[in-house]
Amino acid sequence: MEEPFAIRMPPDIQSVTIGEHQAIIMDDFLLDPHDLLEVATRSVFTPYPNVESRKGYPGIRAEAPGEYSQSIAELLVPLIQTNFGVPEELPMRKSMCAFSLTTVPPSELGPLQRTPHFDASTPNHMAILLYLCDGRHGGTGFYRHNATGLQQITEATREHYLDTYYAEINAKRPAQRYYDQSDSQFTLLGMIPAKFNRMVIYRGSLLHSACVNPALSLNANPRSGRLTVNSFYDF
């Protein structure tokens, strides 16, 4: 009997270079991604933390099945160790694995939601993203901060970056929109397009942003919205 949320084997592992860093892409990741989509349609979504203060992910989430989270960890931990140089002796900690839908209109985004961000400045914090939507919903963009020249925010550069970043957005508020292209503050280095059943893995310390199609993607319906499954591992 097939395990729930089984991964197609062998996985189609592609490494792509973006700026000075790499990301991993695995297409056709699950044998039957529609099983996971059906779970999402039956799930109860609630706002992400900090959404009322116009910070963080601009949408709603629901907990993904534990069986999915466990299934992907068995494959991804050794894959991350190999491809990102994470020492095998470091223990893995993971956050809640969540279905996510963007729902906040551009007019309601706070300043921090209108620019690229980083998830953590620790060296081995990994973002794991499964798209359960297609390319019409944008993708994930990666950026360099022009004033500091930084693509990755580390513990050594975090304070300098944040001082510069906050001074910039206080002097000139970001445009009231979902961020995607280059501007005077950030340069787009590359974008990984959304694709149904595509898994993407990258360091959470990279400056990145969800590239969102406001005309289509601000939708609380898992079948037609910008549905992703988000996990974070820290080693």
Image (cartoon, rainbow, N blue to C red):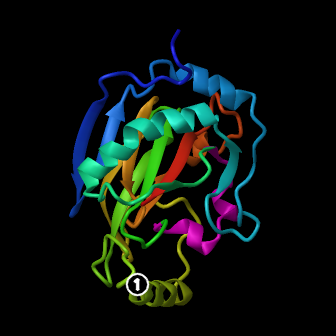
Question: Which residue occupies the extreme top position in the image?
Answer: 1
Q: Is residue 195 visible?
A: no
The residue at the point 50 percent across, 54 percent down is 232
**Is residue 231 depicted above or below 207 in this figure?**
above
- The magenta-colored residue range is 99-118
In the figure, residue 20 lies in which quadrant?
A: bottom left
The residue at the point 58 percent across, 48 percent down is 214
Which amino acid lies under the numbered mark 1 shown in the image of this protein?
Answer: Tyr
**Frontmost residue, 96 versus 144:** 96
Q: Where is residue 62 shown, x and y percent of the image?
A: 70, 43
User: Is 105 left or right of 174, judged from the image as shown?
Assistant: right
- Please state, as top left, top right, bottom left or bottom right, where the C terminus lies in the image: bottom left
**Is residue 182 depicted above or below 8 in this figure?**
below
Across the whole image, how many numbered discs are drawn on residues?
A: 1
**Is residue 124 depicted above or below 5 in this figure?**
below
Q: Where is residue 52 shown, x and y percent of the image?
A: 76, 66
Q: Residues within 10 Å of mark 1 (few under 14, many from 20)?
A: some
Q: Where is residue 177 shown, x and y percent of the image?
A: 56, 62
User: Is 73 left or right of 98, judged from the image as shown?
Assistant: left
